[in-house]
Amino acid sequence: MTARNLRNAILTADLTWGLLAMPVAYLMRYGWVWHGPTDRSALIFVPPLMMALLLWSVMSSWVRLDGFRTGGLFPAVLVQLVLAVSVLMSGLFATAYLVRQYISRLALGYFGMLLFLGFLSIRLIARSILTSRRARGMVRNIVIVGNGPLAREMANKIECHPEMLRRIVGFLSPGEEAFQTVSSASRGDTVILRTPDIVELLKAQGVDEIILTVGSPGHPEIVDLTSRCARQGIAVSMVPQPYELYLTKPELTDVGGLPLLHLLAVPSTEPAWKRSFDVALTLFLLPACIPPMLAGAALLKVRKGRAFCRERRCGKNGKEFEMYRLYSPRGKGGDLPRYERLLHRLSITELPQLFNVLRGEMSLVGPRPEGLARSRRYTDWHRQRLNAKPGITGLAQVYGLRDQHSSEDKTRYDLQYILHRSPFQDISLMLQTGWTLVRRLAHPQKLHSAGADLSASTVDLNLQENLIHAHSSQSSAD
């Protein structure tokens, strides 16, 4: 099942459930009575039902409500559905008010509740079906051709998206790239294979597809490998190079048989809604955030003699600013007192940055600001993350990336966020951040990153051992 087929199947199930949810809501409100509403029949609920189905179809197309854009993570799915159903029901209530048409608010409330429960159940069922298929081995075995960061990222992405029904069984290091990651001590043990031998090995091990992540897919040996795989029934996919030029959802055009990839430019201006959204939501959050912030500040003042500190960070368009935080060092881990570890765990140390938001130096959601030393080493590609105001939280943080992670990893997530900024996404990311903090408080010893590394248990180690040092030292035409 392709990702598009899965999205269409979930949307069809959503619309079918919507058709059933409205009659059930009517029965919950009026019982088995056709003329339940005063002087009207049950048909009065048909227009809001049609409107709800239309709005849900539009939102599903706009923000991908299938729940697998984030890898099917339960917190993300839950938050996304809560927001989407809330927007849907707000639209229904507002429309009913504007047209001065009396429709039972209680019935609509039942309808919204049923929609949320049904939509959540549909996604959990879809997830369980995919999990069952994976457990029964109904997956495509994948070998990634390449040994660099892009190869590892592709493996991680596939592992984080179970709906793809793919399993990484090994990595193949071709040609000149082989010795780039093999130390001189291990080169004597390297297995030298010609291209035909590699293809036979892939076929014997039941490999269904290879994915090219190499920088030179047009190299003669790579071309020979792909053509031989195609003849053996092994599918070939590739990541366009250089990957850094594009981010997500590129538009592919066929120009007389020649593929043309349109690249999406990263917008350099803030959306019109962003500033007012940040200020309004910050003022709303301050009453809840000030008490824990002041409590933490008072504790640090008593214990350490200082409550707040300022750090020089790189902001929008590379402009430096002073970021506020509580006076507690980062990255000390177990060396910190227990109360400081709790402040870090619950991100209370970062709450003073709400004042940076009010000053216009930061946003609630955006790329996390990095230090000046690291930002001075940015490449032109990294600097694209500076097209947006830095945020207190962001997409990279929701996926578990922190200061100790590389700018490369965080930039990929940050640029995806910049391309798809919307109030819906900002609220969703903030709620997911809140969910993460609640989990940290409930399970202090079970902190798991949403963007976990590839699990070794999913990799066929025997095949990986056979392939990781394999390369074609000469063309099969020799």
Image: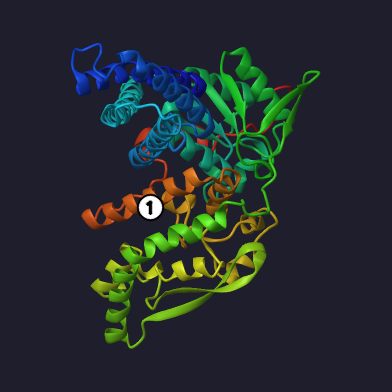
Type of colouring: rainbow
Q: Nearer the viewer, residue 159 or 29?
A: 29
Q: Nearer the viewer, residue 269 or 311?
A: 269
| Image position of 399 (left or right of 118) | right
Q: Nearer the viewer, residue 315 or 103?
A: 103
Q: At 25% across and 73% down in the image, what residue appears?
A: 339
From this viewpoint, is residue 182 visible?
Answer: yes
- Mark 1 surroundings within 10 Å by alpha-carbon count, few (fewer than 14), some (14 through 19), many (20 or more): many
Residue 275 position within the rendered picture, expressed as x and y whole percent measured from the top left: 56, 58
Q: At 40% across and 37% down in the image, what residue appears?
A: 90
Residue 75 position within the rendered picture, expressed as x and y whole percent measured from the top left: 34, 42
201 up-or-down from 445: above or below: above
184 up-or-down from 243: above or below: below
Q: At 60% across and 19% down in the image, what residue appears?
A: 229
The residue to which callout 1 is attached is: 433
Residue 131 position within the rendered picture, expressed as x and y whole percent measured from the top left: 33, 26
Instruction: Residue 232: name its quadrant.
Output: top right
Q: Nearer the viewer, residue 62 or 457?
A: 62
| Image position of 219 (left or right of 196) | right
Q: Which residue type does callout 1 highlight?
A: Thr
Q: Residue furthest right?
A: 256
Residue 81 position within the rendered picture, expressed as x and y whole percent measured from the top left: 37, 35
Q: At 67% across and 63% down in the image, what residue appears?
A: 317
Q: Residue furthest left?
A: 31
From this viewpoint, is residue 165 visible?
Answer: no
Quadrant placement of the C terminus:
top right
80 up-or-down from 164: above or below: below
Identify the element where label 1 is drawn.
helix
